[in-house]
Image (cartoon, coloured by chain):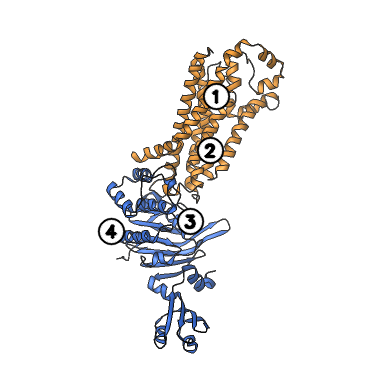
Chain colours: A orange, B blue
Amino acid sequence: MSRLLELVAGPLRAMRRGVFWWSVGLAGLVAVTVAFWPAFRGSSGITDAIEQLPAGVIQAFGLANFGTPAGFLRGNLYELFVPLLFAAAAIALVNGQTAGEEAGGRLELLFAQPLDRREVVLGRAFAVLLALAVITIATALTQIVMDAVADLAIDTGRLLSTILLCALLGALHGSLAVAIAGLRARPSLVLGLGLGLALAGYIVAALFPLSDVLDPFRHLSPWDWAFGGNPLEMPTEPWRYASLALPAVLLTLVGVEAIRRRDVAAG
Amino acid sequence: MSGTEAVVEIEALVKRYGQVEAVRGIDLHVLRGEVFGFLGPNGAGKSTTIRCLLGLLRPTAGRITAFGLDATRDGVALRRRLAYVPGELRLPERISGLDLIASIGRLRGGFDAARRDGLAERLQLDLRRPLRDLSSGNRRKVALILAFLSDADLLVLDEPTSGLDPLMQHEFLSLVREAQAAGSTIFLSSHVMSEVQHAADRVAVLRAGRIVALGTVPELRGRTRLRVDIVFDGVAPEAELAVLPGIVDPRVEDRRFTASLAGSIQPLIEVLARHRVTSMLVEEPDLEEAFLDLYGGSAA
């Protein structure tokens, strides 16, 4: 038991500084952005200006209904920045605990212990999931408090759903990083491919609807699975959570099995 | 001290990385209770062989087992009986030696704290300092403490004394002998002959992925060349010296005679006894010099 606990607790100890700063960063972004809402609410100038923009630009940057509380939050936070930062946090934390450590030769001593490499990677994936949970709670608490402070009057349940979807999208990208790191111990590949696919997913979900030809393909993007139902204003269907969580589990298993089948990188 | 039962069995081991063949068919047995030296220059395939034994690398061909357990298939059970000091030692930076030992201890079912402190004292190491503040030699001491603490049946030590000062190298050799006396088998890899010659019962010499010599230390030493540098009181007796058995590449400059000597030193001593000698230097070549010289042609 202490052995399995150590495989999770050890990485968590190593990540505590990173988790703290990701939490501060995301909570700070939410707090500062929402703090601008009272000033924004009163001014019609910006919303009028946005309405002058082409429909495509409004759609692509989530600026529709920018004058409403939900539209303001979506355009400023939950259309791009918060989900992207969750994905980046998950990818960076996974990379630091797997490919980064392995390529640096720091897993050699650990893999020389009487452990299955799969246990080690699974323990680290679970530790990153717990780290994401901490970041999610910090973000959610800040959002709920700021909702009251700035009088946004958005249903708490909708806020929590939206943030949970961001976290699950992050977890999905973290599991993608686990899979890549399982196949190759190359930190630059994990970061580059992970973040590249995260951005590609956003572009597919945000820009494909502008073209009649491409529009049906937006459903290929996990961003569409997560936010296609407008979670800040509509109840989120349960399948949306599952569409992110299940592939995350599968990708993690791919990474865990892949590292068992290959050579461990020398430092 | 050593039995006849093989603890480590390596058969026709080949490890290829793409086009590069790091290990080209190694066969060897390490016997229970012996200190087995694994010598060779850097890049000879020592660490690759060891990493195959640990299950970190998958052999391209051949078989590698310890205690009858296959390194790839039964790695967890095998590693339960094994402790390892990596050659390229990288440790986590932010934690202390104590934290690392505690963490590995939780993974291995616990370590004896009194013994840990005793080992740290013998190796003169402050385990409370963060690992990033330690010199490479002191970091190696942390890894050595971990290895000797684990009471493993097989200690696999890859370049264990690199970065250690001579006093600590001596302490290390004592620890190896104690572990051997307690019944452990020790697989000691090095590129420095002196590191293993005092401890090893048998030695395999590796070059370019192949074993080029295997035997006891005295047997192997008999096959290496000594460097001889003698200054005589008068003119060097070249005629007597050059014809001695085993003298290679003799050179005379006035009173000074230099040569390499393969084989017994006794005939040389007998000649010297008949002359006045003002200084004499007989040194063992370092491993690269000796073995690359001897086996360079056949092993390439």
Residue B182 has which mark?
A: 4
Q: Quadrant of residue A204?
A: top right
Q: Secondary structure beneath disc 2? A: helix
Q: Determine whether, in the image, residue A134 is placed left or right of residue B124.
A: right
Looking at the rendered structure, whether the residues under marks 2 and 4 are on a common chain is answered as: no
Estimate the spatial distance between the alpha carbons at disc 3 and disc 4, rounded to whole Å: 31 Å
Looking at the rendered structure, whether the residues under marks 2 and 1 are on a common chain is answered as: yes
Which label lies toward us, 4 or 1? Answer: 1
* Residue type at the position of mark 2: Ala
Neighbour tally class for label 4: few under 14, some 14-19, many 20 plus, Cα within 10 Å: few
* Residue type at the position of mark 3: Pro
Work out whether residue A29 or residue B85 is closer to the camera in this orientation and state it.
A29
Estimate the spatial distance between the alpha carbons at disc 3 and disc 1, rounded to whole Å: 51 Å
Which label lies toward us, 2 or 3? Answer: 2
Work out whether residue B24 or residue B46 is closer to the camera in this orientation and state it.
B46
Image position, residue B174 (x, y; %):
32, 61
Q: Secondary structure beneath disc 4? A: loop
Identify the residue position indicated by label 3 in the image.
B59
Identify the residue position indicated by label 2 in the image.
A177
Q: Chain of mark 4?
A: B
